[in-house]
Image: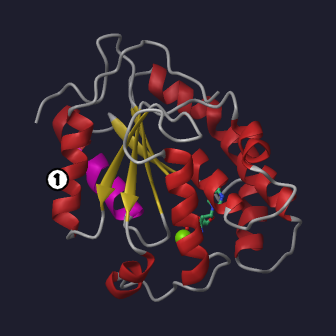
Amino acid sequence: MTTSTTSTSKNRGLLILLEGLDRAGKTTQCQMLCNSLNEANGPGSCRVQKVPDRTTQIGQMINSYLASKTTLPDQSIHLLFSANRWELRQTILDSIYSGQTVILDRYVPSGVAYSLAKGVADMPIDWCIAPERGLPRPDITLFLDIEPEHANIQSTREDFGQERYEVSEFQVRVRACFKEILGDGEKNSGVLDMGKVITIDACKDIKTVAADIWQAVQSQDVESSEIATIT
Ligand code: NYM
Ligand code: MG
């Protein structure tokens, strides 16, 4: 392990994103990566930010919607998810510029993919991306790819299926949308410019996936002292 992964030569932290379907193992892997980085670079040098952040007022509206306690037009919930990211923007930037690495558990690609998968006629991809423009762009995006059927078999989560979107047929469409917007591993090959995107085979066992993620993060070179923005 080297110490090069939590701060650049310009002394800022990294913004690392883990994306994927429900039950791809994102939350576990975010925690494992964070623990490894904190071990390598010192306690507190890294933190995980869950997106959506359900603790804010907007986050609570999102939570009620996901729990089917409220109904909202597809456009409204889409914009609430985006507004929730805008609420987080300043604290993310503050962390990064103070030298702390932030690992995001979901972010803009989830926002676009889940809305796009609904197939709403007046919500084309440009419309879905528009409110995200100007948000900080991760230095590296790791897409934890899993077959939705595999997620069913592997999962030990008994709470799956309780929330909106947690339905296999919908997850199949979300996966196709993720691939359309992120591309298939090549830089900028997707519709959404997320910078460097690496697909990780998340069907492997937890430790192997963690090792693959660690290797991908190690090979990440930050080119700029300024964090990029989503365009
Ligand atoms: N989700 C998540 C969206 O539909 N749009 C978004 O912008 C984000 C960040 O909410 N099924 C969906 C994906 C999940 C759900 O995420 C909540 P999680 O990681 O299960 O708390
Ligand atoms: Mg979920």
Which SS type dominates the magenta stretch?
helix
Q: Amino acid at mark 1?
A: Ala
Tell me the residue at 85%/57% (across/down): 75
**Colour scheme employed for the rendering of this structure:** secondary structure
Tell me the residue at 75%/41% (across/down): 126
Q: Nearer the viewer, residue 146 or 54?
A: 146
Left or right, 50 with reference to 31: right
Tell me the residue at 59%/25% (across/down): 229
As drawn, 154 above or below 179: below
Q: Nearer the viewer, residue 228 or 116?
A: 116
Q: Taking the image as drawn, is residue 120 in sight?
A: yes
Ligand 2 occupies quarter? bottom right
Where is the N terminus found, in terms of image quarters? top left
Magenta residues (range)? 26-36
Q: Residue 136 location, x and y as percent?
A: 58, 29
Left or right, 13 with reference to 32: right
Q: Is residue 223 magenta?
A: no
State how many labels appear: 1
As drawn, 43 above or below 177: above
Q: Residue 93 location, x and y as percent?
A: 55, 26
Left or right, 206 with reference to 141: left
Where is the C terminus found, in terms of image quarters? top right
Q: Residue 184 location, x and y as percent?
A: 41, 48
Q: Taking the image as drawn, is residue 106 in sight?
A: no
Residue 210's quadrant in the figure? bottom left
Q: Residue 74 location, x and y as percent?
A: 83, 63
Residue 127's quadrant in the figure? top right
Residue 129's quadrant in the figure? top right
Dot 1 falls on a residue whose secondary structure is: helix
Residue that label 1 marks: 211
Tell me the residue at 59%/69% (across/down): 173
